[in-house]
Every structure is written in C-alpha cells, then in structure tokens.
Image (cartoon, rainbow, N blue to C red):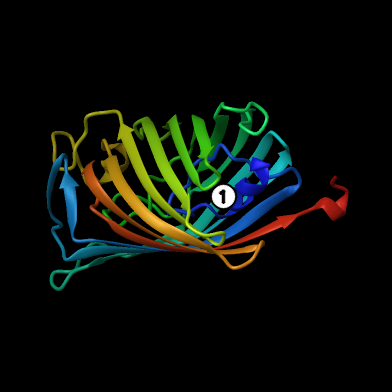
C-alpha cells in the first residue's frame, strides 16, 4: 500500500526553519517531536525593494524551535511550534542596534484532510489548515527584533501527491492576519521530495510571503517604532536532506537563501533538526 511508503515522508520530511502545512497527516494516535537549531546571518537588507548593505556589519540570529504534531483521527491533526531566539547586530564603532532575546511567537493549528490519495486513487491529497499565532515577548522597534510581536490567525489550502512511491510534490497557499497594525500576508509554499534511499530523503523548497500595505523602511511616515507596520515581502529557496536513523529517529539539515524581498534582511539560513516519532496505541488508542 502507498500508505506504507508514505510513512517516512509523513514523519521525516525536511524540517525547515519555518512552519509549513502538510497534506500528509500523521496516522491516528501517533505524532512527532522535532527540535531544530536555526542559524541566520545577513550583511545585506532590502530598504523598500532596494537591496544594499546594512548600516552596521551584520545581523546574526540563533533560534531553537520545538515543534510537534499529532493525529487526532485519520483525517484531523494538530500542530504546535514554539522557540527561543537570540539576535545581535554586529558593529565595530559606533555600536550597532541592541541585542535582543526572548521566546518566539507560538504557532498552533488544526489540519483537516479533505481528500486522501490512498483512498481516492489518482487524486492528490488535499487538506485545509487553520492556525493561530500568539506573540512572543521580545519587543520591537529595532532591526534586531525577533519578530513583529503580533498575534493573529491564518488559513491555508494544501495539496500533495506521491508519484511512483519515491517522489512527492506539495503546495500550500494561505492568508494570515495579525493585530498591532501588522499588514496581512498571503503566503505560498512549494516543495519537492525524493526518497533517494529507504533512509535518505532529499528536498527542494520555495517560499513566498507577500504582505499588504505600502510603508517602507526610510520612506514617508516611517520611524523605528513602526518596523512591524512595514510591508515585508520575502521570497526564498531551500535545499536539504533528512536521514532516517531508524523508524523513530530522523536527522535533517536544510539551507535557505533569500532571493528577493522588501523591507527584510537578506538572510542565509542553516537549520539542523532531530525528529522523533511516537504513538499512543497502548494508551487506549486503536
């Protein structure tokens, strides 16, 4: 059955630095825990749509993400992500922006699988996800802020298909809205996966976040306190691999680069992840 081939993909798909929806839900009463270390560094940024040097040497951010998902039923799953981060603005003299640290935004959601390719042969897997964000405690107003410190909700449509048992495609399109005058965002994620061996999965990813609004860094009406209100667009690509140590444990390594943007840092990113799968069949499950 294709579902048996799907197991490594469901649990050990690349774990990126950013949460993405999946059309392949965990088996009922099972789930995964993922711990990621993410290192981001940038010497360039986009002032509006113009790419140039930062006014100080560089921005460096280190983040530890803990994420989990769990299958409530065969067609409904929950997910959660939280983390801690440290951001510094490196500069010789005068000093750069202040270092910032704190908990990242908390993200959680529910995914409902509308169509299962295992049951509807020839069709893709289709899922709908609704999620929410609770703002972290890091503060804003400087280039080294961890995020926008805004809470909100989002919804997305996710489609995926396993081809030939070793190759998979997935895509997600959605919209999120947040408080504190942060512009709404439309986001697009696309990924391809190749099961190179029974233990090794390779991936390539594309992500695009498109924000509303018209406020640019340094533009009319801008001041540092309005950083969260700027129109922040991010377009990036990524490549990576996940190695399945056994049926429970997976190790992932991914690299991302920004290829275009607006009012955002031009980050290069490396993410290393340890994933562990579990089940609760023995605790009253099936």
Q: Taking 94 as reference, is 255 left or right?
A: right
Residue 155 in view of the camera? no
Crowd band around label 1 with a 10 angstrom C-alpha radius: few (<14), some (14–19), many (20+): many
> Which residue in the rendered view is the most extreme toward the right?
284
Image: 75 above or below 137: above
Instruction: Point out residue 152 in the picture as x, y percentages from the top left corner.
Output: 48, 35
Frontmost residue, 40 versus 126: 126
Picture coordinates of residue 250, whole percent (x, y): 57, 63
Horizontal placement of 77 versus 200: left or right? right
| Residue at left offset 30%, top offset 37% | 229
Vertical relation: 111 (above or below) 196? above
Disc 1 is placed on an element classified as helix
Q: Which residue is mark 1?
A: 9
Q: Quadrant of the C terminus?
A: top right
- Write the residue at 86% across / 55% down: 282
Of 93 and 237, the residue lying toward us: 237
* Whole-percent x, y for residue 4 in the image: 67, 47
Q: Quadrant of the N terminus?
A: top right
Report the side of 189 relative to 227 (left or right): right
Q: Quadrant of residue 181?
A: top left
The percent coordinates of residue 6 (x first, y second) are 61, 46
222 up-or-down from 147: above or below: above
In the image, taking residue 124 as reference, residue 207 lies left or right, namely left
């Amino acid at each position: 059955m294709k579902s048996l081939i799907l197991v490594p993909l469901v649990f050990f798909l690349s774990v990126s630095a950013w949460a993405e929806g999946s059309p392949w839900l965990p088996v009922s009463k099972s789930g995964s825990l993922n711990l990621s270390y993410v290192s981001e560094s940038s010497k360039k940024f986009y002032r509006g749509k113009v790419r140039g040097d930062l006014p100080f040497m560089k921005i460096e951010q280190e983040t530890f993400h803990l994420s989990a998902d769990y299958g409530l039923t065969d067609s409904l799953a929950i997910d959660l992500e939280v983390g801690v981060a440290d951001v510094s603005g490196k500069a010789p003299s005068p000093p750069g922006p202040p270092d910032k640290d704190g908990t990242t935004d908390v993200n959680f959601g529910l995914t409902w699988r509308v169509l299962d390719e295992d049951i509807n042969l020839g069709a893709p897997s289709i899922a709908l996800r609704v999620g929410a964000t609770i703002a972290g405690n890091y503060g804003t107003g400087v280039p080294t802020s961890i995020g926008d410190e805004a809470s909100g909700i989002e919804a997305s449509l996710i489609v995926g298909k396993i081809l030939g048992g070793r190759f998979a495609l997935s895509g997600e399109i959605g919209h999120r809205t947040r408080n504190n005058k942060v512009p709404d965002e439309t986001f697009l994620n696309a990924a391809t996966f190749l099961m190179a061996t029974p233990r090794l999965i390779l991936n390539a990813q594309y992500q695009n976040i498109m924000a509303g609004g018209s406020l640019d860094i340094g533009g009319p009406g801008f001041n540092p306190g309005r950083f969260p209100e700027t129109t922040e667009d991010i377009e990036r690509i990524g490549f990576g691999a996940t190695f399945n140590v056994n049926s429970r444990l997976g190790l992932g390594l991914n690299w991302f680069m920004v290829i275009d943007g607006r009012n955002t840092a031009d980050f290069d990113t490396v993410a290393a992840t340890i994933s562990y799968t579990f089940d609760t069949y023995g605790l009253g499950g099936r």
